[in-house]
Image (tube, coloured by chain):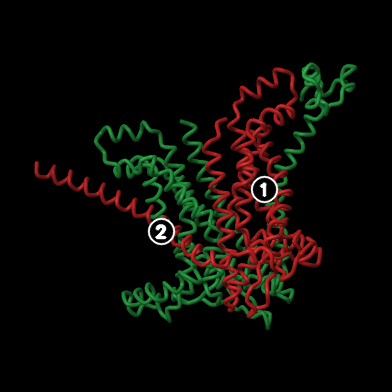
Chain colours: A green, B red
Amino acid sequence: MNPDTQNPSPPGREAIPEEGGAAAPPAASRAIRLRVPRWLDPVFRTATAAAACLVLLLIAAMGAVLYSKGHLATTTFGLRFLWSQAWDPVKGDFGALPAIFGTVVSSAIALFIATPIALGVAIFLTEMAPPWLSKPVGLAIEMLAAVPSIIYGMWGLFVFAPFLAARVEPALQFIAGGLPLFEGAPMGIGMLPASLILAVMILPFISSVMRDVFALVPAVAKESAYGLGATTWEVVRSVVIPHTRSGVLGAIFLGLGRALGETMAVTFVIGNAHRISPSLLAPGCTIASTLANEFSEAISDLHVASLIQLGFILFLITTFILACAKLLLWRIEAQVKGR
Amino acid sequence: MARDRGLYLRRRVANGAMHVLALLSALFGLVWLFWILTVLVQKGVPAINWDFFTKLPTPPGTPGGGLANAVAGSLMITLLATLIGVPAGVLAGTYLAEFGRKNALARVARFVSDVLVSAPSIVVGVFVYAVVVMPLHGFSGFAGAVALAIIMVPVVIRTTEEILNLVPDSLREAALALGAPHWKVILSVCYRRALAGMTTGILLAVARVSGETAPLLFTALNSPFWSPSLAKPVATLNVTLFNYAMSPYDDWRNLAWGAALLITLGVLFATILARVVVGRIRI
């Protein structure tokens, strides 16, 4: 605590208006600046601290409100809600399993596709491309993250889906033969298209975090390896990646957190069917797409409560995954700073 | 000797192959960006004309019409969200950078805002539905603005803190040594020095929420008319785009492409501008 704030101000302090600082003539300004009120210090500090607390309050309120407003679904269905496949607004029977299944499967496939490519992009940008190339390419890749989700959705529905239906999906069926994974009519709408678009959307997030953690590797470590005659790839494989393992994992978790909650793009192309199908070409749904599609049209209290309960489940999953991502990234920062 | 040469060759080949793969990954990313942007320009440009900005939407089947109400609604809601979200975010970011560099509150707040930055926006929509729409018994533009503000806050917090951290401590110490109180140092020295960076952060946050649709779906809802009151449902470009793109009418889909082009150009322009400014900042 500043001692000045406890003591009464010397006479004359309040005589000059505090706001006068900017408008006062230059000759007086030095005297005025010394007379800025000190009691504002604790006020300002408290205001900023309150704003910081607001964030904590926000996440706590989100959890509490979503849980309590979805409570009707819990009391009606109990834990059965989690593994029931029913979704019948007319009869009032709801289950979360198809939505959870769709969320997890689409994100997992997206991650499976996006991770190696993001790793390639990050290696290209940090270790291979000269600065004149890596800057614009890096910016362009980040633009992929700036394109709004709904644009991916619209493009996916009107451009990418017909392309998939005409070219890619028949080819997959031809190659994979009678596997149940690729059964059904190739429509371009379903789990696979949603996963592919998700992969493109999370690619820039994963690669930019990977690029940042790769930049944390001390140049000396890399140069010593080069000095021993290692090739670029050997440096990446034996120095850069082992050095940044938790950061790379953090980047993957971050991408996973993004993919799980991605809404608009998925809503356009996943087909929105509440059923679990072994085929990747069949329509499905995710938690987020179900919310986007049905929330504003849900009428019965139970339907709304079930949707909010779905939102609560999504909130829990993504918060957990994102917290893991953050912890992993903190660990690597601490490692670098501790050196 | 021959074995050595084989090893050498294998290492060269592995290195070359990895170079090619890395290059292909980068190209892979660029191809999508190029593809999406080309389609947007091809389909969006014909849809944008004077009517787009001045006329109300027409019923399906009637040609013409525009999205004037949605453009206005988007601007209104984004402005209100900025007015709510930016002060809160700047204050909290100031706490993290100036007062709570190492204390527990700051550490937890930093962690939580990092989690919230990537949190699904649709969950924010559901939350605002529960705390604003349900108690007020109706969808409203105000609820949409609150939802967007909640998404903005963590973005503004993180950029504000990062930029303020770039202000050298020697400046703060010099001002404090001259007898200035802490709040005065922050307002007149730190903020002034960090102004360009903080503006950039706000710009990025605005760009981020301008592309958001999910949190508006069941807060601001939609409306085919002018919406002068934020207490009623308000049309926004994003939600209109969603409804029109999902509709079976060609006129509406054309308008949706126009809206898509407009939103994307706006967001990309703001993002690139922010990047360029950040690149120039010397603190």
Q: Quadrant of the C terminus of chain B?
A: top right
Chain letter of the residue carrying label 1: B
Residue reaching furthest to the left: B1
Q: Quadrant of the N terminus of chain B?
A: top left
Residue B127 at what x, y percent from top left?
70, 60
For label 2, the residue is B31
**Residue A21, placed above or below residue A242:** above
Residue B195 placement, left or right of A193: right
Q: Quadrant of residue B221?
A: bottom right
Residue A52 at what x, y percent from top left?
70, 42
Residue A277 placement, left or right of B241: left
Q: Which mark is residue B153?
A: 1
Q: Dot 2, crowdedness within 10 Å: few (<14), some or many (≥20)?
A: few
Chain letter of the residue carrying label 2: B
Q: Quadrant of residue A26?
A: top right
Q: CA distance from mark 1 to mark 2?
A: 33 Å
Instruction: Please report the residue visible at 62 percent of the width from the left and 38 percent of the height from the top.
Output: B161
Residue A168 at what x, y percent from top left?
37, 72
Q: Tell which of B166 and A138 is nearer to you.
A: A138
**Given the image, on which type of amino acid does mark 2 rest?**
Val
Residue A14 at what x, y percent from top left?
88, 23
**Given the image, on which type of amino acid does mark 1 rest?**
Val
Residue A270 placement, left or right of A1: left
Q: Which label lies toward us, 1 or 2?
A: 2
Element assignment for label 2? helix
Work out whether mark 1 precedes mark 2 in sequence or the reverse, and give the earlier one: 2
Element assignment for label 1? helix
